Amino acid sequence: MAIPDTISTDEERQYFEVTDRIQLKPGWLQGEGQPLPHMEPYLWRWAEVEPLVLKSGELVTPDRDVERRTLRLATPGLDRGTTHTITAALQLLLPGENAPAHRHTPTAIRWVLKGTGAYTTVEGDKCYMEPGDLVLTPSWTWHDHNNEGDEPMIWLDGLDVPLVRYLRANFYEAYPEDQQPIVGVAESERKFASGSLRPAWEDTSVPYSPLWHYKWDKTYEALQRLAEVDASPFDDVAMEFSDPVTGGPVLRTMTCWVQMIRPGIATRAHRQTSCAVYQVYQGEGYSVIDGQRFDWREGDFFVVPPWVWHEHANDTGDEAVLFSIQDIPVLKDMALYREEPYEENAGHQPVTGRFKG
């Protein structure tokens, strides 16, 4: 530690030399602690992303000994992750391919973007994936991916890797075979997808949703039904995927939302201590994040950092649907979650620029 320039006496200098030698750092010195990395809002355009994801299928072949073919959404300002708590990446699985079975302490979600014919097996439960489906692979559950179809499958991976790495709790184990034994097909969906009813004999004392697979048709139906009766002034018709047993978030460290921004709607701005990674599943519109306008269309991705003003708008004649991964659960568990509405200008922040990319 450098001796501060403000030291004026021999006694002070000797004091700081001793503390430095035995690895003590006085907290009253200016510059105590390390600055946090600056995280910027950012947008990735599907028109630019998709060709590169598909091209990775030609460059990264099975003989390269790569378990997962992924491209991370790398937010400017961060060395790792898409936010400081979440890593989001695009994964490609070609026809006939297998992504070998393993398990790890980081929790993961799969939001299916394109293709049919592939499935994820979670703890022996074979879950066929279609666009708009959400598949969970909770912490330390065996999972593998297989493509039985004749077209490429692309999905969005979301993991709490940055958080788990920071806590030094990152563990991994490979399954002895490439594929784990299949004990059922869509078992968790048939048992728990009704939401309000569940098997009376099932042990549900696990720290995550016992429902692995949330199907798009039921998700979209729920959005439509909610739109008939209510909406949020900040997020319009927004729904959280929930644990059918507890009613809480599907995972302990991450939650997933789906929201409909109806034609002509401009939501009010607010900010939260949580962060979010969004995917535009359907339609087009724009978001204003920290005064900057981000125009988005179907397939695009964008990130909202913690504690920045943000609002969404749809100035088209068709509905828009956004999916998002958020770290709200861990903040609420630690009593650190905070939310604040933007009070000026009828709840709309001034637009000072437009994202160019």
Image (cartoon, rainbow, N blue to C red):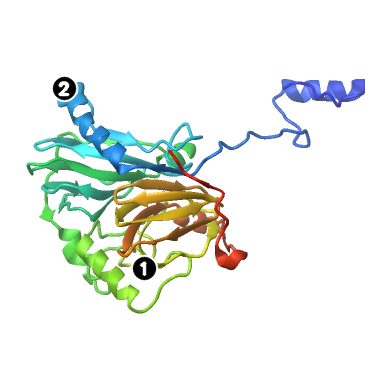
The answer to whether residue 35 of the structure is visible from this angle is yes
Q: Is residue 111 above or below residue 164?
A: below
Q: Residues within 10 Å of mark 2 (few under 14, many from 20)?
A: few
The image position of residue 153, as x and y in percent, is: 17, 43
Relative height, residue 64 to residue 281 (above, below): above
Tell which circle, 2 or 1, labels the residue nearer the N-terminal end: 2
Residue 246 vertical placement versus 291 (above, below): below
Q: Quadrant of the N terminus?
A: top right
Q: Residue furthest bottom?
A: 229
Residue at 8% from the left image edge and 43% from the top image edge: 148
- Circle 1 SS class: loop
Name the spot of residue 233 as percent of width and height, x first.
Answer: 47, 69
Q: Amino acid at mark 1?
A: Gly
Judged from the image, the secondary structure of the residue bearing numbered disc 2 is helix
The residue that appears at 55% across and 51% down in the rendered structure is 291
Disc number for residue 130: none
Nearest the viewer among 174 and 235 is: 235
Quadrant in the picture for residue 63: top left
User: Which residue matches tag 2?
Assistant: 63
Q: Within 10 angstroms of label 1, few (less than 14), some, or many (20 or more) residues?
A: few
Q: Name the residue nearer the viewer: 278 or 192.
A: 278
Q: Position of residue 109 (x, y in %)?
A: 31, 49
Q: Amino acid at mark 2?
A: Asp
Residue at the disc numbered 1? 247
Question: Which mark's residue is nearer the viewer, 2 or 1?
Answer: 2
Q: Quadrant of residue 238?
A: bottom left
- Front residue of 139/258: it is 258
Spot occupied by residue 55 in the image (x, y as percentages of width and height): 21, 30
